[in-house]
Amino acid sequence: MKSLFPPLLFLLLFLLSCNRDLPTHKDISVARNELPMVLKKFNNAFANGDLTILDSLTTENYVHTNGSSKVISKTDWFNYLQQRNRQLKSGDLKVMDYSLEEQQIEYQGTTAIVTGKVHIVTRDSLGTKEHEYRITNIWVYGNGGWKRAGFHDGKIQKP
């Protein structure tokens, strides 16, 4: 009679290799503590136009929506960011303040829904502008850590 040990060992190793991408309960707990720091890193990168960091913190199938345009892909958003970066580097656009206020995070397993209010002050050739937006972000946790998968904002109208 053949031994069942080699096939069972192979099956066990196969199953373990399939699950290596799934975070454990402990991993998720650690990840929850990391997300607020990742949010700060992301917001600083956006304010300063650091496209390398923004790329590393967004999923490949990232979806971006706001009240002033149709839904756009990561590629389209990065095209906008590159144009914005040229303005930042030339000094035509200066970000005087960029902050996420009233931040709340709701976790759903390896997904987080981040809401809050973004306050931004910029200066360009037309002068200083101040805006506030209500935002909703979808963040997912995986092998590469936290990445933003979706974004939506709506401009807060001043009374």
Image (cartoon, rainbow, N blue to C red):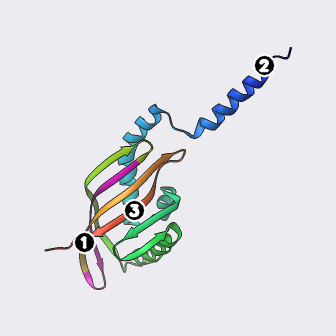
**What's the amino acid at mark 1?**
His
124 in magenta = yes
Structural distance between the alpha carbons of marks 2 and 1: 68 Å
Determine whether the residue tagged by mark 1 lies in a helix, strand or loop. strand
In the rendered image, residue 47, in percent from the top left (x then y), is placed at 36, 65
Type of secondary structure dominating the magenta stretch: strand
Residue nearest the viewer, comparing 106 with 132:
106
Q: Name which residue lies at 37% across and 53% down.
A: 39
Of the two numbered discs 2 and 1 on the same chain, state the one appearing first in sequence.
Answer: 2
Asked if marks 3 and 2 touch (Cβ < 8 Å), the reply is no
**Which disc number belongs to residue 94?**
none
Residue hosting label 1: 131
Left or right for 104, reference 39: left
Residue hosting label 3: 151
In the rendered image, residue 15, in percent from the top left (x then y), is placed at 65, 32
Determine whether the residue tagged by mark 3 lies in a helix, strand or loop. strand
Range covered by the magenta-colored residues = 112-127
Residue hosting label 2: 4
